[in-house]
Amino acid sequence: MALKTVKEYIDSLRALNTRVYMFGEKVDNWVDHPIIRPSINCLAMTYQVAQEPENEALMTATSHLTGHKINRFCHIHQSTEDLVNKVKMQRLLGQRTASCFQRCVGMDAMNAVYSTTFEIDEKHGTDYHERFKKFLIMVQDNDLVVDGAMTDPKGDRGKAPHEQADPDMYVHVKERRPDGIVVSGAKCHQTGSVNSHWHLFMPTVAMREADKDFSICFACPSDADGIYMVYGRQSCDTRKLEGCSIDVGNAKFGGQEALVVLDDVFIPNEYIFMDGEYDFSGMLVERFAGFHRQSYGGCKVGVGDVLIGATALAAEYNGVEKASAVKDKLIEMTHLNETLYSCGIACSCEGCQTKSGSYLINLLLANVCKQNVTRFPYEIVRLAEDVAGGLMVTMPSETDFKSPTVVGKNGESIADVCNKFFATRPEVPTEDRQKVMRFLENICLGSAAVGYRTESLHGAGSPQAQRIMIARQGDMEGKKKLAKRIAGIEEK
Ligand code: SF4
Ligand code: FE
């Protein structure tokens, strides 16, 4: 089947029976819900941009399994060039949406599961890899969105999965049948879950033998019996219900996170890709996390590009674009943003082939990339707020800017007053200033912050998770040897 168009993607969502709850109620027509729709539009850009001739090379790839032309989000990386193109694709989409386009978690999960299942089979004589390849071909040929689902609720963080008072704190096998398993549990803050056709569930931590029933990986349709989602709130989300577009900041696009619950869901054998091989849960987690940490060197940089552009516009509208301090702040923002990109590219170029033949990023550099992402976007946002000024959080509403209510002695309306006092240069319409300020508010503090600022800290693992990996991959013993050799200290 050919690549899906935007319309075909949105129609395919309508055909699903996905159960979505928000503000305490079931949302039946979630595809057209004003809070959810911008996130669908955002994910749909992964389909739209793939249809643009000028972006075809970046957005599409040739399936190594079928030879078919597929969306790169469904591709298994076959070279370091593929890894680099992935990051470039993510930067492009960040530039086009200024938001989280959600489809990367599935791409990263599929790549992690692909190489890990090969190695599980090699050691345990299982046939997970062949099963996974069949699933993958179905995903590629139908141009589907798969949500990579990793983060369990975890309950008491001081306890292993099998020690939890409530076993549902980690997704686990509740019942075994000849034709499959029944699973129970949940995954928290799942990016794009409502907008996905399928979910690919993975364990969230390295496990031991006692955690065998929690060491599972499987795929499941998003509307399978027993699966439902509780939509995550975002800052300023109800502005989308007000019928205004300027106050929303980015009315076209947005991210999406949800709590995904597995309430005794049956998984047929053909969709099980790990069941009890606890010795590989660490590898799967490490690879998925590594891929997603690489991803942030692309998507966050693309959003950063838009943020820097909006900051420069705000400076222009305020008439301060020539001030050397402003210019220097924009340079600093660019320097930080490009440093993140350098990390994304570096961990891709330094990637290596796995036993399965697919390519994996350099894990140390991918973790360094994400560690920088936990810091630099905060500084970039600080500088954006510095240049833009406090108006981005104090400006009256869009309704005020349009209100005919008379307030002045000479018949001035609220709209007249707002437009008079928030004007800057005569050639700059006040509405454009409003738009750029609200847009900045959206990225820095509003609903896009879930895809930029706060997500930069916790998405793809919180900062400490990268530090653990950096410690593991940093080869301290090797570094000590280097020092000893030059300093003339003999090895004992
Ligand atoms: Fe993709 Fe970035 Fe969103 Fe993750 S946060 S799904 S990498 S856009
Ligand atoms: Fe993320």
Image: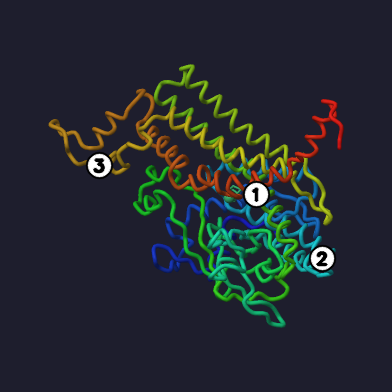
- Label 1 and label 3: CA atoms lie apart by 46 Å
Q: Earlier in the sequence, mark 1 or mark 3?
A: 1
- The label on residue 234 is none
Precedes in sequence: disc 3 or disc 2? 2
Is 361 on the left-hand or right-hand side of 7?
right
For mark 3, give the secondary structure: loop
Q: Name the residue nearer the viewer: 429 or 254.
A: 254
> Who's the residue at 60% across and 28% down the image?
335
* Image quarter (top left, top right, bottom left or bottom right) of the C terminus: top right
Whole-percent x and y of residue 381?
Answer: 49, 35
Q: What residue type is labelled 1?
A: His
Task: Say whether mark 1 is within 8 Å of ligand 1.
Answer: yes
- Which residue bears the numbered disc 1? 292
**Residue 406 location, quadrant:** top left
The residue shown at (58%, 29%) is: 334
In the structure shown, which secondary structural element does the residue marked by tag 2 occupy? helix
**Amino acid residing under circle 2:** Asp
Is 213 on the left-hand or right-hand side of 456?
right
Query: Dot 2: within a 10 Å radius of its alpha carbon, few (fewer than 14), some, or many (20 or more) residues?
Result: some
User: If you read the primary sequence from the N terminus, does the residue marked by circle 2 or circle 1 appear first?
Assistant: 2
User: From mark 2 to mark 1, how far is it between C-alphas?
Assistant: 24 Å
Residue located 45% across and 60% down the image: 32
Quadrant (top left, top right, bottom left, bottom right) of the N terminus: bottom right
State the residue position of label 2: 121
Is residue 298 visible from the viewing direction of this image? Answer: no
Location of mark 3 (residue): 403
